[in-house]
Image (cartoon, rainbow, N blue to C red):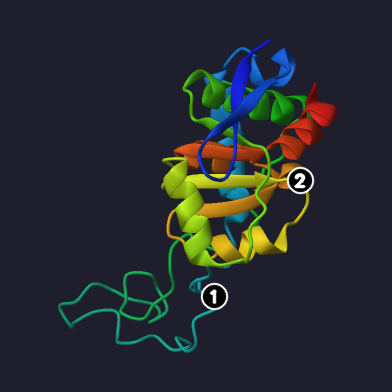
Amino acid sequence: MPNVSVYKTDGKEAGKIQLSDKVFGAEINKAVMHDAIVAHLANKRQGTQSALTRSEVRGGGIKPFRQKGTGRARQGTIRAPQMTHGGVVFAPKPRSYSQKLNKKVRAKALCSALSMKVTDKDMIVMEDLKMSSPKTKEMAAILKNLKAEKALIVTNGKDEDVVRAAANLQGVKTTMADTLSVYDILKYDKFIITKDAVKAIEEVYA
């Protein structure tokens, strides 16, 4: 079982924590992590793009000019795709890009991403993230003590103080243990998580 240090908000070590092998010491599978990220980005797409086909363009009920004698190529309607303001060939229409991942595949991808953070020593476990006041300046000081600029902060449940303090920090995002995604884990350089959140994740995936 992997052991990692637990830190206080001042950056000093407060002890060690033993992590679950099934969650934080799993075999790193890049293929399933890739599938999870592709699905995550696909599900974020709105799919609202739309253009008019030749049947939807207004006008074009009359032949624009006679068939012969003009020297131009014959045309039957101004709505044809080759005409200016004509319809679009294979025009994009609103559609859903959503992808579904098997539950076991999602779990495997998440454990792979968490294990990668532990292996790369980019995971920082916090004793807690209690602050005297939910201010950006205080959160910035905590991140400076931890030597983490671009970081994902994970708490067990929504912590309004942490969310407010980190909201205006560039390159910092807050999330909860039950809404954690592979995309967010891999996007940020440092993975900061509270002890309570570690236990919550292990209860679900161990």
**In what element is the residue under mark 2?**
loop
* Label 2 Cα neighbours within 10 Å, binned few <14 / some 14-19 / many ≥20: some
In the rendered image of this protein, does residue 149 appear above or below residue 96? above
Camera-nearest residue between 112 and 36: 112
Callout 1 crowding tier (Cα within 10 Å): few <14, some 14–19, many ≥20: few
Drawn side of residue 69 relative to residue 8, left or right: left
In this rendering, the answer to whether 182 lies above or below 48 is above
Task: Please name the amino acid that badge 2 sits on.
Answer: Asn
Q: Residue at 43%, 89% (x, y): give it.
A: 62
* Residue at (67, 53) in percent of width and height: 130
- The residue to which callout 1 is attached is 55
Residue 103 position, x and y percent, is 78, 31
Q: Which residue is mark 2?
A: 156
Three-letter amino acid code of the residue under disc 1: Ser
Q: Nearer the viewer, residue 171 or 47?
A: 171
Numbered badge on residue 140:
none
Q: Which x, y percent locates residue 55?
A: 54, 75
> Toward which corner of the image does residue 191 lie, by quadrant?
top right
Disc nearer the start of the sequence (2/1)? 1
| Residue 142 appears in view | yes
Q: Is residue 46 above or below residue 203?
A: below
Circles 2 and 1, Cβ within 8 Å, touching? The answer is no
Answer with the quarter of the image where residue 69 lies: bottom left
Viewer-side label of 2, 1:
2
Q: Which quadrant of the structure image shows residue 4?
A: top right
Residue drawn 72% across and 46% down?
A: 179
